[in-house]
Image (cartoon, rainbow, N blue to C red):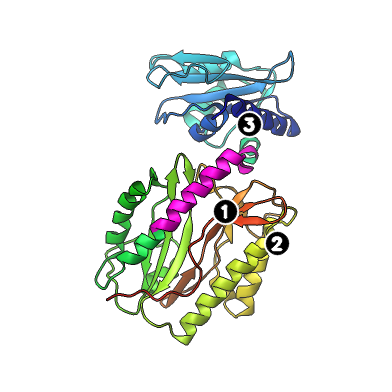
């Protein structure tokens, strides 16, 4: 990725910090550090952080990366690299680098074992949660990110066909879920973006059911909620299948969810609020008499993580912006009986949205022969 991409991202974060009255921030989330610098490592229990602040001479972003010498080489990742050993105290290094007379923004990932000593050391005049400055920047994807999102969803579309082909009488939820990673890797993905959900029959009425040893019986409905990670970016999609001709009630529930999904997708465009999108789907389900069985928000933003801040819910009144990517996933969950969810990812365009999942919504009865 071009180096200027990272400087543009850092500039956006600085603008966001300025808007909330901050001139410096300590970023500890490894994915956000990668987003801002191109450098990634998983620190586990060791300290890793990026100090981002306004350079007084020209107002540009000044960066300082604190990394253990056990971590991969970070040359070029920041204006200054501060390396230390296990016996060194990173808190004192950060304190000496901060402007102690100013407030310091920190992100939500900064562990208490580092934050509290920084506070005791008076590394800043006050500490403020500033995750929103980075979260907002990450929310609006550039074109290179959007193409990676599309590519991950193309893999997920193909994987859904593989999943449907695994359904047979006697197969267990766990068996199918455990086989998915191999298929993802065959298709060019690196990993799951979250633990796959495979639900048979009444198990689908639990929105976050964990696959177990439940065997498939002919006539069960089957729900797959799955996603992969490809070149760092996530996909997420849900489809629900039948294994026998649906009953009138099953078909009514399924078609209600499908209509809710498509109605919500149809109104996505810049200026429409996340709350309005949620309400559009919810009205369809409530109008069919199933409102009490739609028990979660309509969706979530997605990118480097499967669930990113800024949900699609009745409490989120911000308007959507071009470049944002989020899920539309209405569902109806009748305990002990039926669970249906249909989920796509959408990218907000200049005048509408692009649905980046292409696996069909239509009713499908799987052939178990």
The numbered disc on residue 276 is 2
Residue 193 screen position, x and y as percent = 43, 48
Confirm or deny contact between disc 2 and disc 1 (CB under 8 A). Answer: no
Q: Residue 62: percent from the left, percent from the top?
A: 64, 19
Q: Earlier in the sequence, mark 2 or mark 1?
A: 2
Give the Cα distance between marks 2 and 1.
14 Å
Q: Residue at x 60, y 70 (%)?
A: 260
Pointer 2 local density, CA inside 10 Å: few below 14, some 14–19, many at least 20: many
Q: Which residue is mark 1?
A: 300
First along the sequence among labels 3 and 2: 3
Near-viewer residue (143 or 109) = 143
Q: Secondary structure at mark 2?
A: helix
Q: Nearer the viewer, residue 88 or 270?
A: 270
Residue 210 seen in render: no
Could you give the CA–CA distance between mark 1 and mark 3, rounded to whole angstroms?
22 Å
In the image: residue 86, left or right of residue 35 = left
Is residue 278 highlighted in magenta? no
Q: Which quadrant of the structure image shows residue 139?
A: top right
Tell whether label 3 touches label 1 (CB within 8 Å): no
> Can residue 37 be seen by looking at this rendering?
yes
Q: Quadrant of the C terminus?
A: bottom left
Q: Nearer the viewer, mark 1 or mark 3?
A: 3
Residue at 46% of width from left, 14% of height from top?
83
Q: Residues within 10 Å of mark 3 (few under 14, many from 20)?
A: some
Q: Position of residue 51 (x, y in %)?
A: 58, 22
Compared with 66, 245 (above or below) is below
Q: Which residues are magenta?
A: 137-159
- On the image, the x and y values in percent for residue 73 come to 43, 18
Give the secondary structure at mark 1: strand
Residue under numbered circle 3:
9
């Amino acid at each position: 990725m071009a180096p200027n991409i990272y400087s543009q991202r850092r500039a956006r974060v600085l603008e966001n910090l300025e808007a909330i009255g901050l001139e410096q921030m300590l970023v500890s989330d490894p994915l956000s550090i990668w987003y801002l610098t191109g450098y990634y490592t998983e620190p586990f229990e060791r300290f890793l952080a990026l100090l981002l602040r306004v350079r007084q001479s020209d107002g540009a972003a000044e960066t300082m990366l604190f990394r253990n010498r056990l971590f991969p080489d970070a040359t070029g990742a920041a204006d200054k690299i501060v390396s230390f050993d296990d016996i060194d105290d990173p808190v004192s290094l950060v304190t000496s680098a901060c402007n102690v007379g100013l407030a310091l923004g920190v992100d939500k990932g900064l562990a208490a074992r580092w934050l509290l000593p920084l506070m005791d050391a008076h590394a800043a005049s006050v500490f403020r949660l500033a995750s929103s400055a980075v979260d907002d920047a990450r929310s609006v994807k550039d074109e290179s990110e959007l193409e990676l999102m599309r590519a991950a969803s193309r893999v997920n579309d193909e994987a859904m066909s593989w999943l449907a082909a695994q359904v047979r009488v006697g197969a267990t939820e766990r068996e199918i879920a455990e086989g998915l990673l191999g298929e993802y890797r065959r298709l060019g993905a690196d990993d799951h973006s979250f633990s796959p959900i495979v639900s048979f029959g009444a198990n689908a009425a639990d929105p976050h059911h964990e696959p177990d040893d439940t065997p498939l019986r002919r006539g069960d409905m089957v729900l797959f909620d799955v996603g992969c990670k490809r070149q760092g970016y996530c996909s997420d999609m849900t489809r629900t299948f039948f294994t026998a001709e649906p009953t009138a009630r099953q078909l009514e529930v399924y078609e209600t969810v499908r209509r809710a999904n498509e109605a919500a997708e149809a109104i996505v465009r810049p200026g429409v609020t996340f709350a309005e999108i949620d309400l559009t789907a919810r009205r369809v389900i409530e109008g069919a008499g199933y409102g009490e069985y739609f028990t979660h928000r309509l969706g979530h933003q997605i990118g480097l993580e499967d669930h990113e801040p800024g949900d699609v819910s009745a409490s989120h009144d911000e308007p959507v912006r071009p470049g944002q990517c989020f899920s539309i996933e209405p569902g109806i969950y009748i305990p002990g009986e039926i669970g249906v969810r249909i989920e796509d990812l959408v990218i907000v365009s200049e005048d509408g949205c692009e649905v980046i999942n292409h696996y069909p919504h239509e009713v499908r009865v799987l052939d178990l022969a």
